[in-house]
Amino acid sequence: MNRKAIITVLVASFFSTIVFAKADLPIHGEKAISIFQPLNAGDSSLTKSISVYNQQIKIDLFDDFAVVNSIYWFNNTSGKNIEMRVGIPQVESEFRKVYWLRININDRAPSAARDTNLKEHWQAWMVNFQPGITQVSLYYGVSTSLASKMNCLRYDFSNYKWWKPDSTRGDFWIRMNGGLTTSDIFGVFPDKKFLAGNSIAHGSISELVKDSTGGVLICYRSLDSVPINLSRVNWEMKYSNLTAWNPNEKIIATLLPFSAIDFEGKKTQQNTSPVDTGNGMQWMIGIFLVCAILALFIWSEWQRRRTQ
């Protein structure tokens, strides 16, 4: 092996170690949850007279999953009843799969959505938007677990394009559960738009929409390395607990400005994260390879001079 070849192997080994150590990025391509939309694109002309007048998003965060209660107040300004089939698309590349979806319209008894069983599955139902205000409340569960041993949830505002532009009033509430607190949140986007206490965070939707690039992203600590089987979660009990929670302005008055931008969880996980431990091992292996190649180089030079 000549000197040029040895140097080439040395450099390649060192930089390959750096690349593999940096390769694990935790939140690229994160799927979203959002407001529902018309099942048929042709109904979009009807939705232009229906606006989201107000809304309240409440989310209970657990390790591996989240429970969502979204209440939307729609204002139909057409002066006539508009009935349409709406739903949540289950597009794997864009939207999270939802569990135990229940719909409550104008405080009636909750009903279950139906799967369209089409090529792209939808959880769908009928809504009759009467003139004036119609309240539609959704409840469902979603997975938040990522392969990088952390949890992330994204709420997307871009799906609001289906409805008439009106007001961005409303509240976005987050409650930590199962031993989690707001100190376990690595990152929240947009930053510095939430107020938080020990277990509760609040954001004004008008501020979140104005300063975000289309949604809210929350990433937080994973407590257990073994994922929860979501089919065994008692969603009905989680539903009761979440709907019974009625946060208000008195709670907001107790909260303080909150900021978290460590989306990879580096500071919090540096002593405990399997990912960071693995990266440390990769650096050690890289250093070992460099030392081994240097030793081989020195030995080959010594052998060459000895034979001269």
Image: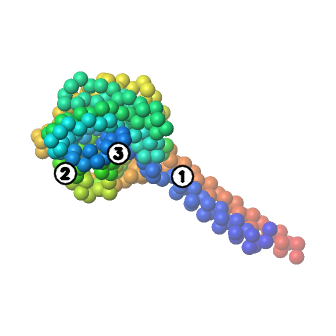
Q: Which of 68 and 17 is in front in this view?
A: 68
Which quadrant does the C terminus fall into?
bottom right
Label 3: which secondary element: helix
The answer to whether residue 35 is visible is yes
Q: How many marks?
A: 3
Cα separation, mark 3 vs mark 2, equals 21 Å
Q: Viewer-proximal residue, 219 or 246?
A: 246
Q: Mark 2 points at which residue?
A: 166
Q: Circle 1 — which element?
A: helix
Task: Find disc 1 in the rendering and name its residue.
Answer: 279
Compared to residue 17, the image places residue 35 above or below, namely above
* Disc 2, SS: loop
Relative image position of residue 34 (x, y in whole percent): 33, 43
224 horizontally vs 155: left or right: right
* Residue 155 visible (yes or no): no
How many angstroms separate mark 2 from mark 1 (CA)? Answer: 49 Å
Residue 291, image x, y percentages: 66, 62
| The residue positioned farthest toward the bottom in the image shown | 308
Q: Residue 42 carries which label?
A: 3
Q: What residue type is labelled 1?
A: Asn
Q: Label 1 near label 2: C-beta < 8 Å?
A: no
Sequence order check, earlier mark of 3 and 2: 3
Numbered label attached to residue 291: none
**Against 243, is 218 above or below?**
below
Q: What residue is shown at x 53% (from left), y 55% (from top)?
A: 23
- Give the number of the mark in front: 2 or 1: 2
Query: Tag 3: Cα neighbours inside 10 Å, few (<14), some, or many (≥20)?
Result: few
Colour mapping used in the image: rainbow
The percent coordinates of residue 115 (x first, y second) are 41, 30
- Amino acid carrying label 3: it is Gly
